[in-house]
Structure formats: structure tokens, C-alpha cells
Image (tube, rainbow, N blue to C red):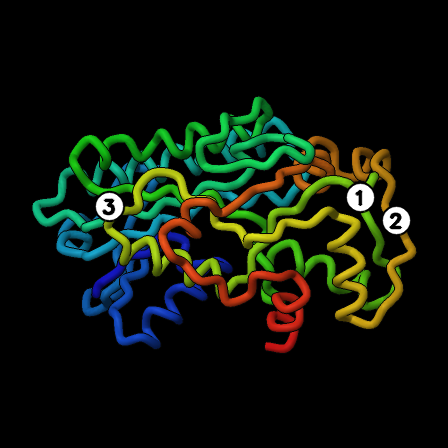
Amino acid sequence: MEVAITGASGLIGSALAEALTRAGHRVARVVRTKPAPESGDIFWDPERAYVDMLKLDGKDAVVHLAGESIAARWTPEKKTRIHASRLRGTQLMAEAVRQLSKPPGVLVSASAVGYYGDRGAEVLREDSPPGQDFLAEVARDWEAATEAASRAGVRVVLLRIGIVLSKRGGALAQMLTPFRMGVGGQIGSGKQYMSWIAIDDVVGAILHVIEQPSLSGPVNVVAPHPVTNREFTKTLGKVLSRPTIAPLPAFIVKLLFGEMGEALLLSSQRVEPARLKESGYTFRYPTLEAALRHVLSE
């Protein structure tokens, strides 16, 4: 199988590329710097709406993961970049796929559980309506930007990804230092739900949706047992053998991080991976403690 990946240097993209290569598949990284002529990598420039169509043609699958990081204070300019990077890049890739003489069997495009907004303890499945905040708006537009590929008859899968657990990057990597120092604790009320997933299962889920022709549309890429922030805090402290008695009050989160902090640290999404379970995906790390022990032992 030949798979093209945008965002291949990111946390998920690099793990996916490694897994595909290890399994004997060929990976073409979609990159913003022109590769050497003999390289299998594919050049694209979303700012100028350019993709090397000749190299993209004939791939079995395209996995689109690229997008501006949301982990920084949200100034108006930052919010514009977050939205534009996802919309522009996804529209470009979907339109490129539509025009190929040999289009891929599937376009797998990233989205996020932020689609659902702040929903408290409500159980959220793929057919749940979207939220109303900034991240929900971004996710709605992000998903809609794949329409050109869908209209052309290409199977499109939209990955609504939760909090990815890996010590190599993402939210967990940022938590490790304070928790190891014994100054970790719950955030705000601690009642907000965290829909998490181990990096191995993110990769496993992507491989699964590529190989399952019956799957299209939104797929929640989260573990089957979401936990509250209080539960997450206690479990991480247990795995690290550290106390968790230094809470971070909500007003401090808002003061330090503004709207970004409210959306990423205080909002609640209790998401169920309904379609992954229905399609037969078996989670390698379905429980939080097992997932944390695995990713922190790597």
C-alpha cells in the first residue's frame, strides 16, 4: 500500500509513518520544502494552492493531518491562522484528490472532538450535533472542506481526535514536568470530561479506517472510557508515584491562557468511539492507567 501523509513530522504523522513503514507499506510525506528529485516525498504549498499532482496520483490512501497548532494563547491573529490553515490545506487536498486520474481509495482527514463544544457529562457520539464555540466552528468548517473529494466519489473519513497520550508531545508531555515535581493537580472543578486516546490506538484507528471500506464520514478517535479531569489527575499521579495536591483554579487558567485555556483545559467532552467499536476495532489500551503506563515506559 502507498500512503501519502500531510503533517508527517507531527506527533501523529510521525508515529503513523513509522508504523506503515514497519509494516512494509510505502509512505510519501507531503512536505512544504521541495524534495530532491529522486525522493518519494510530495511537495505542496497551501499558501499558493499547489500540490505536485504527478507524485500524488495513484496513491492508495491520503491521510491529511496538517494544521496550525492550537496550543498557544489565542490572539485574533492566532485564531485566524488556526482556522485558515485547516480550511485552506483541507480544501486544497480535497480538490487535488478530485482531479487525480487515479484517485486514492480513501481520504482520511483530521478533525477533533472540539467539534462538540463544551457539553458537560452528555455522552457524545458521531451523530451528536456540533457545539457553538470557536473550536466547534473550526472543526465544522474543517470537515466541510473535504466536500470536493466526497462529491467526486472518494471515500472520506473524518477523524474526530481526542487528547492524544504520548510522552513525545501533546498535552501529556506538557503535564509531565509539574506532575513529576509533585506540583500537579486537578484543573478547575475537575469535573470536566477528558476524552483521551493512546498514540498507539490513534495509529491503529487510522490503519483500521483505511482498511474498512464501510467506514466514511465522522469517526470519534478516542478510547472507550473517558474520565473526568479529577480521575485523570489521580491516575497520572498514581502512575508517576507523585502526589496531586496542587490544583489549578479556573480563574488562574483564564488569567494565564485566556480563551485557549477555557477551551482546552476547562471545557468538557464525554465522547464515545461508537463507530470504531461498531466496525470491530479492538483498542490496545482501553483504560487510562494501562495507557499511561505504556506510553510513559516507551
Position in image of residue 16 (x %, y %): 40, 64
Q: Mark 3 falls on what kind of element?
A: strand
Mark 1 to mark 3: distance in Å? 45 Å
Residue type at the position of mark 3? Val
The mark nearer the N terminus, 1 or 2, is 1
- The residue at 64%/30% (across/down) is 119
Residue for badge 2 = 247
Question: Residue 70, labelled with which disc?
Answer: none
Residue type at the position of mark 2? Pro
Mark 2 to mark 3: distance in Å? 47 Å
**Given contact means CB atoms under 8 Å apart, are the residues at marks 1 and 2 in contact?**
yes
Choose mark 1 or mark 2, whichever is in front. Answer: 1
The residue sitting at the right extreme is 245
Residue for badge 3 = 51
Residue for badge 1 = 190
Residue type at the position of mark 1? Gly
Mark 1 to mark 2: distance in Å? 9 Å
Closer to us: 207 or 275: 275
